[in-house]
Image: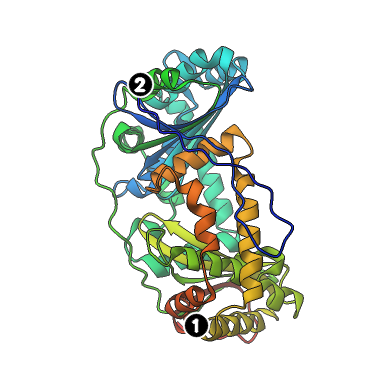
Amino acid sequence: MLTAPVTLHAQAQPATEEIEPVEAIIDIQLVTSPGGIEAWLVQDNSIPFMAIEMWFDGGGSLDRPGARGATNLMMALLEEGTGDLDSQEFAAAQEGLAASFGFDTYRDEVVVSAEVLTQNRDEALALLRGAIVEPSFDEGALERVRQQVISGIEYDLTDPDTISGRTFNALAYGDHPYATSLDGTVESVAGLTRDDIVAAHRSALVRDRVSVGVAGDITPEELGALLDELLGDLPGSDLPLPEQAEFMAPGGIEVVEFPVPQSSVLFGNEGITRTDDDFFPYFVMNQILGAGGYRSRLNQEVREERGLTYGISTWTGLSDYIAMHQGAFSSSNDLVAEAIDVVLAEWEDLSENGVTAEELEAAQRYMTGAYPLRFSGNGSIAGTLAAMQADDMPIDYINTRNERVMAVTLEDIQRVAERVIDPETLQFVVVGRPDGLEPSN
């Protein structure tokens, strides 16, 4: 059993003008099961429960041709029965053990999570193993959950925010799986067979593409045995992962006519990957531009100064096969054209002039101070550990992250802004009936 502890020490933020990075206290151990399955563990025996999160690479992007939505529907069926237990009996058994299970589908991974009491751990995880390894996929449950998924898709067709996202993806990603919704369409989901669900299960839940994070009341030795019990019977992968995506949107404004009083706007262009040398300057720059809530430039200019929206934000989209820099806001139809002009002006100003020393200091102070708050519970810690592995981040990332944020300089941000922030390539998708706004593509 290999263990590699990483210790981070806590310090309060100093009440001086000099900023020191705040650190968290987390000991991460690398655990390898006798069967070769790895996990990152934060052991904490103070409360008798543990959280485990498992990220399986591939996700909804592994849907086979003609079966869009199969992975999403399959994951929704995992808690609908296993072995002799039907869906109601499975739910009753889970409740009787006071266990909490989660099954989610994303573009690049499917995620299974659980929180269990120490006294019920073996029995609860045996129940979870049945859901993961030997789900029933009963025809009755399939039809019932299929209708639930279709109802959700039909609702999304009336939601401007969802429409803007799907329109943007269709413009941006060509024939890559990112171009279409992992939920599928009404037609594709209606046509899925039980064989499609079984095939999706075979492709998505595989032992050689899993990243495991664990936090709570369990020793490394106990966890090693548990990993083999829980995941050891899963098959290996049988489908290649998707190719890299190419950003194909031309830049400009796309308008989708929709009868609502307020337009929904999504905008973005290609960003910087986590492995790029410029990632941390880019990360801090985005905090100043639009991720910093009330103090961000876009919030100040679009909302506070001109009252054009109730909120605007930007984010760094770090999907596995392309990095995106995106933002969103909503504005009444008579104001949305002005709001877009202000966004473009801020884009141009940042590209030409960078940021100020005061903006950089405020962003660094917030980003380093808020970071330890992510590790406030076993569930959030387990999820973070699994995500870090899925993103190929080093086990000491948490230890070095704040130092790298603090190392960012004004010159770094100016260089990155000139590289990434280009009003000419910025693609807007507007869903609504915007006054005086002409589509440009």
Horizontal side of 236 relative to 213 (left or right) equals: left
Visible residue check, residue 238? yes
Residue 18: which numbered mark, if any? none
Indicate left or right for 296 with 138 as reference. Answer: right
Q: Could you classify mark 2 by the number of other residues whose Cα lies within 10 Å: few (under 14), some (14-19), or many (20 or more)?
A: some
The picture quadrant where one finds residue 161 is: bottom right
For marks 2 and 1 on the same chain, the one whose residue lies earlier in the sequence? 2
Q: Secondary structure at mark 2?
A: helix
Q: Quadrant of the N terminus?
A: top left
Q: In the depicted view, which residue is nearer to us: 366 or 286?
A: 366
Q: Amino acid at mark 1?
A: Pro
Drawn side of residue 63 relative to residue 347, left or right: left
Element marked by disc 1: helix
Vertical arrangement, residue 207 with respect to residue 86, above or below: below
Whole-percent x and y of residue 117? 59, 19
> Which residue is the site of mark 1?
423
Q: What residue is rendered at 54% in x and 75% in y? A: 410
Question: Is any atom of residue 99 visible in this view?
Answer: no
The residues tagged by marks 2 and 1 sit, at their Cα atoms, a distance apart of: 52 Å
Q: Amino acid at mark 2?
A: Asp
**Nearest to the observer: residue 408 or residue 314:** 408
Q: Report x, y in % for residue 66.
A: 31, 49
Q: Residue at x 61, y 19 (%)?
A: 48
Coloring basis for residues: rainbow
* Depth order, front residue of 239/51: 51
Q: Which residue is mark 2?
A: 228
In this picture, is 124 found above or below 154?
A: above
Q: Position of residue 418 (x, y in %)?
A: 45, 81
